[in-house]
């Protein structure tokens, strides 16, 4: 009975602390869910190089997304490890292998990650063009037998071609707010992997489907949404600082299932458009890859500081389209 009372008391405290960031305006800086300094520490970062193996991803004029993302991810691992020597860096892949999104999420959850960073390249379809080049005679028939008649008419002719899409620059995504239910399920299913001993003891009396536990994970998911949004916005700010074209931080509900299946704050970084010749050259260059990694690392360092000081900018869901 005493354990049940203690667990409910713990939940009430969590709800009280979370309420502020749920209701606060989008420009304020406020503390999120209160945790002990030990809990508010960035211990493990999981880096996922998008695609791999039989999954080539997007294709540029001379390169494939799976190779570019792996090269950037490996450099990011080294850059983060140098900047944050006390943080464990886990890679979902270090070679050209294929894992489906379910396997990638399982690796991240098994590693007890505190942050998930997925590296990708964007692509835009070529732009289609057409112009009328003249007319030609089209012959057709009507009727049958003796009533069959021949007709002709002039019809326009066209020339068709495509040109490269000029779309370029970076985008950083988080899971869409309407996918929060999926994120809650991922957290509940992986509780034993990432819950610290104190939390595990507090929630031992709660049934998985209990209203109390549902409330806790709803609030926790909202907290993770806020943290992910903060990091995504900061990544794009860092890209702007190095002269990249930023297409801003956004929510996306399609094509990034792995973000909502990982029980941790998660972002997906579209490092550039491999379909754009200029971006493709940049993405394949050593200097370009290192600039990308340095920008992401700077943002992660800001994130780590905000985590340890327990302050994040509150981001309204509507501000990330």
Image: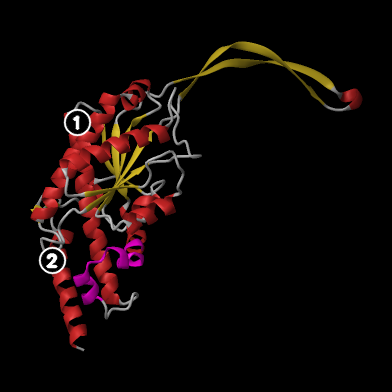
Q: Is residue 234 visible?
A: no
Q: Earlier in the sequence, mark 2 or mark 1?
A: 2
Residue 191 among magenta residues:
yes
Q: Position of residue 309 (x, y in %)?
A: 8, 54
Q: Viewed as shown, does residue 278 lie left or right of 131?
A: left
Mark 2 touches mark 1? (CB < 8 Å): no
Q: Which mark is residue 240?
A: 1
Q: Is residue 39 above or below residue 143?
A: below
Q: Which residue is mark 2?
A: 17
Residue at image location 40% in from the left, 33% down from the top: 67
Residue at image location 25% in from the left, 30% down from the top: 290
Q: Viewed as shown, does residue 266 lie left or right of 10?
A: right
Q: Is residue 160 above or below residue 267?
A: above
| Camera-nearest residue between 319 and 214 | 214
The residue positioned farthest toward the bottom in the image shown: 1
The residue positioned farthest toward the right in the image shown: 146
Q: Is residue 10 above or below residue 141?
A: below
Give the extent of the magenta segment. Answer: 186-203
Residue at image location 18% in from the left, 60% down from the top: 22
| Camera-nearest residue between 18 and 292 | 292
Residue 82, by quadrant, is top left
Quadrant of the image containing the C terminus = top left
């Amino acid at each position: 009975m005493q354990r049940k009372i203690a667990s409910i008391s713990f939940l009430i405290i969590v709800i009280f602390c979370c309420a502020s960031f749920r209701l606060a305006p989008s420009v304020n800086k406020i503390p999120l869910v209160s945790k002990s300094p030990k809990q508010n520490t960035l211990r493990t970062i999981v880096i996922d190089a998008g695609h791999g193996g039989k999954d080539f991803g997007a294709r540029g004029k001379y390169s494939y997304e799976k190779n570019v993302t792996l090269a950037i991810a490996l450099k990011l691992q080294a850059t983060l490890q140098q900047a944050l020597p006390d943080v464990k860096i886990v890679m979902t892949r270090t070679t050209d292998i294929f894992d489906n999104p379910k396997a990638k999420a399982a690796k991240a959850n098994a590693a007890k990650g505190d942050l998930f960073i997925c590296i990708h390249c964007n692509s835009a379809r070529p732009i289609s063009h057409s112009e009328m080049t003249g007319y030609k005679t089209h012959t057709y028939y009507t009727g049958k037998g003796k009533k069959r008649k021949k007709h002709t008419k002039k019809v326009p002719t066209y020339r068709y071609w495509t040109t490269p899409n000029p779309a370029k620059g970076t985008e950083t995504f988080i899971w869409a707010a309407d996918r929060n239910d999926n994120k809650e399920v991922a957290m509940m299913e992986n509780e034993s992997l990432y819950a610290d001993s104190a939390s595990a003891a507090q929630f031992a009396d709660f049934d998985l489907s209990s209203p109390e536990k549902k409330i806790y994970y709803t609030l926790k998911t909202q907290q993770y949404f806020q943290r992910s949004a903060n990091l995504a916005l900061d990544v794009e700010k860092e890209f702007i600082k190095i002269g990249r074209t930023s297409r801003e931080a956004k929510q996306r509900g399609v094509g990034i299932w792995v973000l909502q299946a990982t029980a941790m704050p998660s972002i997906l970084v579209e490092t550039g458009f491999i379909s754009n010749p200029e971006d493709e050259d940049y993405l394949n260059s050593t200097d370009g890859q290192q600039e990308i990694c340095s920008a992401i690392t700077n943002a992660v360092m800001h994130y780590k500081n905000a985590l340890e000081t327990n302050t994040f900018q509150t981001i309204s869901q509507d501000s990330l389209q």
